[in-house]
Image: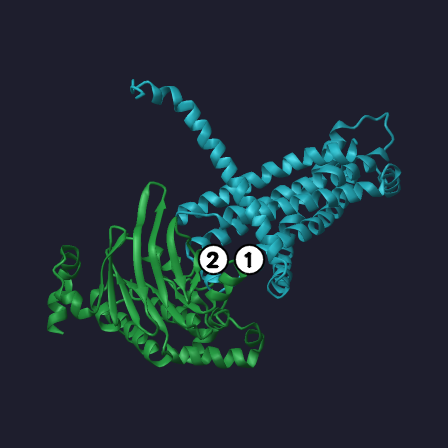
Chain colours: A green, B cyan
């Protein structure tokens, strides 16, 4: 379970998070929405300790993330797969080595036969052919890079998956493929997922619950139906653009 | 008691505010640099991560730097020889030329020239690589996989600096002396026996050690400073450019400072 209580973060004069309360239960997929620049990615990076809060508590599996020692934090991170917005693949390594780095168990990492099998399995899970393993990130399209990023995140069989804007910059067809992948991985692997997005259609399609971050605070957390029925002005303003298409769908 | 704001406080305090910012900025750098050194020491535990990458990095630095080292040391040795020929006084024995060229190259020219050239070549590369990795979240990705950036990225580069700059300096010393030997024979009637005799006459083994010790420190400075600059890059492509420039400038200045310091400590104490 992931819990954030009263999390505050500022960069210089800019207040990014202003007392965020946010919970994700075991096995569910939560979409964290909000306009660009509202701190969604910053919030996500708090969960695996890439950013430390100025105030508040982040608890993952009953462990207070900000208070963990280096080795404990490294251990926790092996249970959290993180999919970066632009893939964040290592340029100097081929796809095989990129995904292999996701193997958190050192014994398995050193076992080349296991590594090859696991990388092939992860590529299959993200709908990529095995020959992609030999390519370098610069040889991949944007959608493929995102999928390789997902393959790397799931290589270590994590308990949690955090997606940072998995569909941003993609055409609608590729965005749909990624959305379907997020949903399928949640169902097949049983992982607990948090996906940061400003794509309302995609969020309603993949998430069990939604949360809207606005001006540093969570305005509403609830099911897709609760969002549809919400009369909160911030929720209406954010969803208005896509509501017609949602209702039509 | 309430203090009335006269509006004069801001202009009067401006110099102190600026000074305070500079001091805080400098302390911030010292703190972050110290933290990076601590991370490096911790990272040494993960031998499996840094050892193979260090071998690769040493090979990259060595192989990639050899051509430029060959060129600059050959020209430096030859120019030293030509200038010696220009300033030569007939009353002096020709064997002194061997002493002059070997001492100049080994004690000063070799290590400093190699240090400054490699500050540009590998210092810029380290800062640009790590800076790009930082702004494209590759370093965050490494951390999110539970792996140490110090073991995977910093230690191999720093060790390659410490190890390869002395080796390249030895090569540069040899090439520069040979080029100087050849060059001086073109401008003055020096025989091989004269040059060889002079080269050995005042040469002490410590001169060679001094050259290597200096280049060891220069290599460490290049590695540590460039990795620090790259690792702390912010603000996209512009930030990478700033870090790269800062890495080359800071490494060069520190090399010149270390050069003076080591000369004072090792030669005059």
> Split into 4 quadrants, where in the image is the N terminus of chain A?
bottom left
User: Tag 2, which chain?
Assistant: B
Rendered image quadrant of residue B93: top right
Whether B57 is drawn above or below A8: the answer is below
The residue that appears at 11% across and 71% down in the rendered structure is A247
Q: In the image shown, does B100 or B10 lie closer to the viewer?
A: B10
Whether A222 is drawn above or below B105: the answer is below
Whether A177 is drawn above or below B106: the answer is below
Rendered image quadrant of residue B269: top right
Residue B187's x, y, as percent? Answer: 76, 35
Q: Is residue B74 visible?
A: no
Which residue corresponds to mark 2?
Answer: B139
The answer to whether residue B136 is left or right of residue B82 is left
Mark 1 and mark 2: span between their CA atoms?
9 Å
Task: Check disc 1 and report its element: helix, strand or loop.
Answer: helix
Q: In the image shown, does B5 or B185 lie closer to the viewer?
A: B5
The residue that appears at 79% across and 44% down in the rendered structure is B208
Query: Which disc number belongs to residue B153?
Result: 1
Q: Is residue A66 visible?
A: yes
């Amino acid at each position: 379970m992931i819990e954030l209580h009263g999390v505050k973060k500022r960069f210089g004069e800019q207040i990014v998070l202003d007392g965020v309360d946010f919970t994700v239960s075991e096995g569910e997929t939560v979409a964290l929405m909000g306009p660009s620049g509202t701190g969604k990615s910053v919030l996500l990076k708090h969960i695996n300790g890439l950013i430390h809060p100025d105030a508040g508590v982040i608890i993952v599996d009953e462990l207070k993330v900000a208070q963990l020692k280096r080795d404990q934090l490294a251990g926790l991170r092996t249970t959290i797969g993180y999919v970066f917005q632009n893939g964040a693949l290592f340029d100097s390594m081929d796809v095989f080595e990129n995904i292999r780095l996701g193997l958190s168990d050192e014994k398995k990492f050193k076992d080349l036969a296991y590594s090859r099998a696991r990388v092939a399995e992860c590529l299959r899970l993200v709908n990529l052919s095995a020959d992609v393993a030999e390519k370098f990130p610069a040889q991949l399209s944007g959608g493929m890079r995102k999928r390789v990023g997902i393959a790397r995140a799931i290589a270590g069989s994590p308990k949690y998956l955090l997606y940072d804007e998995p569909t941003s910059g993609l055409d609608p067809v590729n965005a749909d493929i990624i959305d379907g992948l997020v949903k399928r991985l949640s169902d097949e692997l049983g992982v607990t997922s948090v996906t940061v997005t400003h794509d309302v259609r995609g969020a309603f399609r993949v998430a069990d619950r939604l949360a809207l971050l606005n001006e540093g605070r969570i305005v509403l957390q609830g099911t897709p139906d609760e969002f549809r029925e919400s009369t909160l002005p911030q929720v209406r303003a954010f969803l208005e653009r896509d509501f017609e298409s949602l209702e039509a769908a | 008691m309430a203090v009335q704001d006269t509006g004069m406080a801001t202009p009067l305090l401006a110099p102190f505010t600026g000074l305070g910012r500079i001091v805080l900025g400098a302390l911030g750098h010292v703190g972050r640099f110290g933290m990076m050194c601590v991370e490096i020491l911790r990272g040494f535990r993960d031998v499996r991560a840094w050892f193979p990458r260090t071998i690769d990095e040493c090979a990259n630095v060595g192989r990639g730097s050899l051509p430029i080292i060959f060129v600059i040391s050959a020209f430096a040795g030859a120019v030293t020889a030509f200038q010696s020929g220009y300033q030569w006084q007939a009353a002096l024995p020709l064997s002194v030329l061997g002493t002059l060229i070997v001492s100049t190259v080994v004690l000063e020219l070799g290590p400093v020239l190699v240090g400054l050239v490699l500050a540009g070549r590998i210092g810029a590369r380290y800062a640009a690589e790590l800076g790009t990795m930082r702004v494209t979240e590759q370093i965050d990705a490494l951390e999110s996989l539970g792996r140490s950036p110090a073991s995977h990225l910093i230690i191999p580069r720093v060790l390659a600096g410490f190890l390869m700059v002395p080796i390249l300096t030895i090569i540069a010393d040899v090439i520069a002396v040979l080029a100087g030997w050849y060059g001086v024979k073109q401008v003055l009637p020096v025989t091989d026996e004269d040059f060889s005799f002079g080269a050995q006459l005042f040469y002490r083994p410590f001169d060679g050690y001094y050259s290597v010790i200096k280049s060891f420190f220069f290599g460490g400075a290049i590695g540590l400073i460039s990795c620090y600059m790259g690792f702390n890059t912010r603000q996209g492509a512009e930030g990478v450019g700033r870090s790269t420039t800062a890495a080359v400038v800071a490494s060069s200045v520190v090399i010149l400072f270390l050069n003076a310091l080591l000369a004072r400590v090792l030669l005059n104490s």
